[in-house]
Image: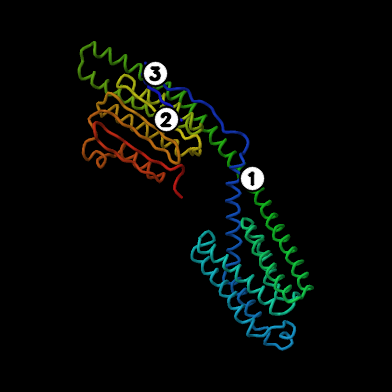
């Protein structure tokens, strides 16, 4: 949806609009809770893996695999297990190697790294597959090699996000084992495997659901805390904006009015030197008032919405252009676009103000056009029909132009200028600060 506005000029370019009090919705949205839930599950997962992938835990798991491998060396145990070293050694070695590989991956890239996530899935497949093979070769579904599965089931508490993967892997493994025993005609073992499969799947789901429920409660508390902090910050912004508007701004407006009276009186007296001094005074007061107005404006935008920003920008650009040149403002909004974060809105405000101010003060233009586009990104375009930007202006800038570049880079975006029949500024910003 495009909204275009040819902005009329204002009779009072130095008036400061009163600060408007706005507050975000009182209820926490499901989307906010989902974001916090995802963050809480990630933290829970990483913290759980940090203990499991420690040197001590890894050594204990490898020792357990080594014990399983060497257990058939004891003759009574070999008779009970039904398998020999030639069977347990290769499967235990595969399991141990997958454990060590996952620990190394965690140490190198952490719990959020893709290498570790792949290594963890490989470890799960290896451990469960080795358990299936050892149970099958033992010839009995009552084998102690179910230990591999019990560890897998118990670990599901630490990763509620992947519960479907865990249940699928567990279900496929036990189904394959049940079919293998059925082919042998060992239907008692099939019943045992089926019972363990159902019980294990229920336990995996219950453990993961319990962890998810607890983490969701934590996510709701976080979201409510963030909303409360946001309300407190916005209330403080409103208070500061009101104090600036009703106090400092009023005093500066009075000072500007008195300075103009003094200028007229000095000019009437014919004192050229005094007139020049008063001119500087009027200019300084006007600049201070303009900066204060920008500060109040930024405080209002921080507590508002994107539509309110667009409305305020119309007013602000109108005042900047008043009595100097004609302004055109065009907004391009993608209705499916995500909301623009507060930080991005404030930087958009400052960029538009600085770009239009440069056109008004330095370009000697007749028309300035502002385009603001919101979609997958926020794009600001400011163009005028003036003299263009002098060579080396950006490199020599210590204020406005360089600040626009810094603001764009701060948000992971970019800013560029071109001079072709005027000055053309394009700033592209992502919908969020870089990570």
Cα distance in 3D space between marks 2 and 1: 37 Å
Sort mark 1 into few (<14), some (14-19) or many (20+) by Cα contacts within 10 Å: some
How far from the left and from the top, in percent, is residue 230? 55, 38
Q: Which residue is mark 3?
A: 254
Res. 375 visible in picture: yes
SS state under label 2: strand
Looking at the image, is 310 positioned above or below residue 85?
A: above
Q: Disc 1 or disc 3, which is closer to the eye?
A: 1
Image point (77%, 73%), residue name: 189
Q: Are marks 2 and 1 in contact (CB under 8 Å)?
A: no
Looking at the image, is 346 positioned above or below residue 258?
A: below
Q: Quadrant of residue 132?
A: bottom right
Cα distance in 3D space between marks 2 and 3: 36 Å
- Observer-nearest residue: 313 or 131? 131
SS state under label 3: helix
Q: Is residue 208 left or right of residue 98?
A: right
Give whichever of discs 2 and 3 has the lower sequence position.
3
Q: Is residue 240 left or right of residue 32?
A: left
Q: Which residue is mark 1?
A: 221
How far from the left and from the top, in percent, is residue 326? 32, 22
Give whichever of discs 1 and 3 has the lower sequence position.
1
- Observer-nearest residue: 307 or 10? 307
Q: Which residue is mark 2?
A: 331
SS state under label 1: helix
Q: Are marks 1 and 3 in contact (CB under 8 Å)?
A: no
């Amino acid at each position: 949806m495009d909204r275009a506005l040819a902005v009329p000029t204002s009779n009072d370019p130095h008036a400061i609009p009163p600060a408007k009090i706005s507050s975000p919705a009182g209820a926490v949205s499901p989307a906010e809770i989902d974001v916090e839930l995802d963050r809480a599950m990630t933290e829970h997962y990483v913290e759980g893996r940090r203990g499991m992938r420690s040197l001590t835990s890894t050594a204990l798991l490898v020792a357990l695999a080594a014990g399983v491998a060497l257990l058939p060396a004891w003759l009574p145990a070999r008779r009970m297990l039904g398998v020999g070293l030639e069977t347990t050694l290769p499967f235990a070695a595969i399991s141990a190697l997958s454990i060590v590989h996952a620990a190394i991956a965690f140490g190198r890239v952490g719990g959020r790294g893709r290498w570790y996530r792949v290594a963890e899935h490989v470890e799960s497949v290896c451990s469960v597959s080795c358990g299936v093979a050892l149970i099958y070769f033992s010839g009995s579904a009552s084998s102690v090699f179910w230990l591999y599965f019990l560890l897998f089931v118990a670990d599901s508490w630490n990763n509620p996000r992947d519960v479907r993967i865990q249940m699928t892997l567990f279900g496929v493994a036990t189904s394959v084992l049940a079919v293998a025993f059925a082919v042998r005609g060992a239907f008692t073992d099939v019943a045992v495997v089926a019972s363990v499969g159902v019980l294990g799947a229920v336990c995996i789901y219950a453990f993961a659901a319990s962890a998810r429920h607890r983490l969701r409660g934590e996510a709701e508390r976080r979201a409510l805390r963030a909303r409360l902090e946001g309300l407190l910050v916005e209330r403080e912004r409103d208070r500061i904006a009101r104090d600036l508007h009703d106090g400092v701004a009023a005093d500066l407006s009075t000072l500007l009015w008195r300075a103009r009276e003094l200028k007229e009186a000095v000019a009437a007296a014919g004192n050229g030197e005094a007139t020049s001094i008063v001119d500087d005074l009027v200019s300084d007061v006007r600049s201070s008032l303009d900066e204060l107005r920008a500060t109040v404006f930024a405080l209002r935008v921080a507590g508002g919405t994107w539509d309110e920003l667009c409305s305020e920008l119309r007013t602000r650009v109108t005042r900047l252009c008043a009595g100097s040149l004609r302004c055109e403002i065009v907004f391009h909004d993608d209705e499916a676009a995500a909301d623009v974060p507060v930080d991005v809105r404030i930087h958009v405000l400052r960029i538009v103000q600085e770009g239009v101010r440069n056109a008004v003060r330095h370009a000697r233009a007749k028309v300035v056009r502002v385009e603001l586009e919101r979609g997958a990104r926020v794009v600001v375009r400011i163009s005028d029909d003036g003299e263009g930007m002098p060579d080396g202006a950006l490199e020599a800038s210590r204020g406005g132009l360089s600040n626009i570049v810094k603001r764009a880079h701060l948000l992971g975006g970019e800013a560029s200028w071109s001079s072709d029949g005027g000055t053309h500024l394009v700033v592209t910003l992502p919908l969020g600060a870089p990570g």
